Amino acid sequence: MKYHPIIRIIAVLFLFLSCTTISRRDYDRFVESLPEPSGTVFQDVFYSDNGKRCILDIFWPEGDPETWKSDPAPVYVFVHGGAWIMGSKEFIRLYDKTIIEPLRKKGIVVVSVGYRLFGQTSFKNISKDVHDAMEFLRANQKLYRLDMSRVVIHGQSAGAHLAMLEAFRHPEGIRLIINEYGPADLITMQKDQPAVGIVSRKIRRAESPVEWVRSGLPRMVIYHGDADELVPLSQTEELIAELEAAEVPVELNVIEGADHGFMNQTQEVRDEIAGRICNEITAALGI
């Protein structure tokens, strides 16, 4: 039986939004409640002319810019999650004390990327937005004092999917990929989440990170819960098999009993994971 496209879209929205009890009003309040950034921050910088969501924030290192800006600073790029249908670049502020502040204190520029959501644009254009953001940073690295030869890219869930695609397709300058519970194969993903089938099989294959694995890619560190029902651990296991076959360095950290986003874990556990990620970033950037 074939369903009308609108019915299929409603099914997708119900699937992902049913994973949380947050309403749109609560979501807006949540974003507004996030800590305001301190220090020198370039907010809502447009990286393309494809709409108001094609913006990013650039957090300069803490302290007097004159003490460091004579030399370009290494870059940490964060790509938010949200099932490709929600979320914003402000999500990074959840890690104000555990990632943003420690990295800025060590002389690292923090960048958080926004992008158009599915429904506002085609699915394949979402990954193009992330690429456009990276190209903007490369083109303006002198202006913002960025060392784009020393980059770590990090994504969560849908953001990890997008970060992987960018790093696999355009690995130049990327020292490390941090993948938190990201979908890797949108073809096999449909077995666990049938609603992914709203996107054509051709596009799902082209937008699957496993299809872009090859030798010479940057090292990847993965964090994934073994009780994740939204993006099952099998997605990561399939990805690791491809990476190892291509001799790409990869490290898997399985969080026992953790669901998607580690939401059933204590704040202490989540902070400990963020601390480990922060250490991975600084080590990869040689700091």
Image (cartoon, rainbow, N blue to C red):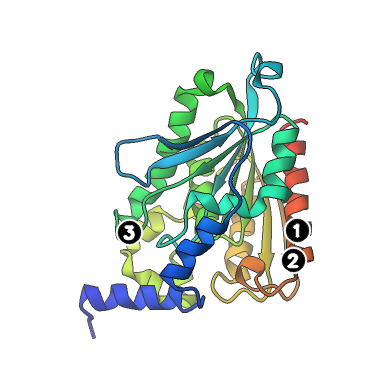
Horizontal and vertical percent position of residue 63: 71, 27
Disc 3 residue crowd, few under 14, some 14–19, many 20+, Cα 10 Å: few
Question: Is residue 183 in view from this perspective?
Answer: no
Q: Is residue 118 left or right of residue 160?
A: left
Horizontal and vertical percent position of residue 53: 37, 47
Q: Image point 72% across, 58% down: which residue?
A: 252
Tag 1: amino acid: Asp
At numbered mark 3, what does the secondary structure look like: helix, strand or loop?
helix
Q: Quadrant of residue 6?
A: bottom left
CB atoms at circles 1 and 2 under 8 Å apart?
A: yes
Q: What's the mark number on residue 151?
A: none
Q: Is residue 255 left or right of residue 248?
A: right
Q: What's the mark number on residue 267?
A: 2
Tag 2: amino acid: Gln
Of the two numbered discs 3 and 2 on the same chain, state the one appearing first in sequence. Answer: 3
Q: Nearer the viewer, residue 34 or 87?
A: 34
